Image (cartoon, rainbow, N blue to C red):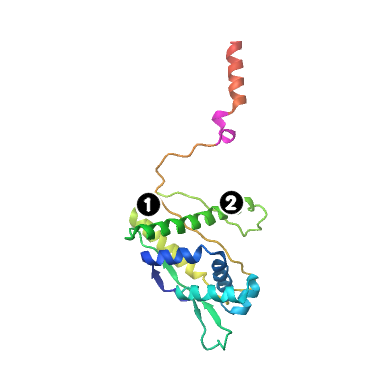
């Protein structure tokens, strides 16, 4: 198990900068590539992503400004610069005071994450039977106090860290896995099922009941 990454608590200005960075698909691809390979030079990243070295170098510098990656100065020579991924536990505290534009950036980051997470849910269910055990879906409900919720989340983070490996040091045969934990009170009304999935709204059964009553 690798050491626990340092926790970085985001501020309102951080959220604005993060949204600008993460809304760019090239920067997201760079983060994914360095997260997988650990270290790479700008030429290698450009080749892997199919981008020009000039474009890639620009985005690498912007990500370094946000302290999401760092230059490996001892390996950088001349115009060829080497970069590494920085393992950081990024956290946005609830109730963070933000200006209007910072809150707008936070909402947009949430929308990006939600869009990605929803696509993962669809992929998990659609590919479940053919996944050969790679896709795991577990759903449950518990009656818990707020203190138990916090304890559960802390134990979950400990379990995730148990399987965490450093970029570039992943075990053979491993794959990048999406792992999510969502906990919230489940006390609201249930969404309505589409008519074709709701057994209580089967039009054929209604017709049969009407026919039976007419005969009586």
Real-space Cα separation, disc 1 to disc 2, in angstroms: 28 Å
Dominant SS in magenta: helix
> How dense is the environment of label 1, judged by Cα within 10 Å: few (below 14), some, or many (20 and up)?
few
- The quadrant in which residue 147 appears is bottom left
Contact between marks 1 and 2 (CB within 8 A): the answer is no
Q: Is residue 199 within the magenta segment?
A: yes
Q: Residue furthest front?
A: 54
Residue 144 numbered mark, or none? 1
Instruction: Please state which of residues 144 and 103 is positioned toward the viewer in this rendering.
Output: 103
Query: Which residue range is magenta in the image?
Result: 194-201
Q: Residue 41: image x %, image y %?
A: 59, 80
Residue 122 numbered mark, or none? 2
Rendered view: 38 above or below 128 = below
Q: Residue at x 56, y 83 (%)?
A: 81
Secondary element under disc 2, as helix, strand or loop, is helix
Q: Is there any visible trace of residue 165 in the rendered image?
A: no
Q: Is there any visible trace of residue 153 in the rendered image?
A: yes
Q: Residue 188: image x %, image y %?
A: 40, 41
Pick whichever of labels 1 and 2 is earlier in the sequence. 2
Instruction: Please state which of residues 110 and 56 is positioned toward the viewer in this rendering.
Output: 56
Rendered view: 140 above or below 74 = above
């Amino acid at each position: 198990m690798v050491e626990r990454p340092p926790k970085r608590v985001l501020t309102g200005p951080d959220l604005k900068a993060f949204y600008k960075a993460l809304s760019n698909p090239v920067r997201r691809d760079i983060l994914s590539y360095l997260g997988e390979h650990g270290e790479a030079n700008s030429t290698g990243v450009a080749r892997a992503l199919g981008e020009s070295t000039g474009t890639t170098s620009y985005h690498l510098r912007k990500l370094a400004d946000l302290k999401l990656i760092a230059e490996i100065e001892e390996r950088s020579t001349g115009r060829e610069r080497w970069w590494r991924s920085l393992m950081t536990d990024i956290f946005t505290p609830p109730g963070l005071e933000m200006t209007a534009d910072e809150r707008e950036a936070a909402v947009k980051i949430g929308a990006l994450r939600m869009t990605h997470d929803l696509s993962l849910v669809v992929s998990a269910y659609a590919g479940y039977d053919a996944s050969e055990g790679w896709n795991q879906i577990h759903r449950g409900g518990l009656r818990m106090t707020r203190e138990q919720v916090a304890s559960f989340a802390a134990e979950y983070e400990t379990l995730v860290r148990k399987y965490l490996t450093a970029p570039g040091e992943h075990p053979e045969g491993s794959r990048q896995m999406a792992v999510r934990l969502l906990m919230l009170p489940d006390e609201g009304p249930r969404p309505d099922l589409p008519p074709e999935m709701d057994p209580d709204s089967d039009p054929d059964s209604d017709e049969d009941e009407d026919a039976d009553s007419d005969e009586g």
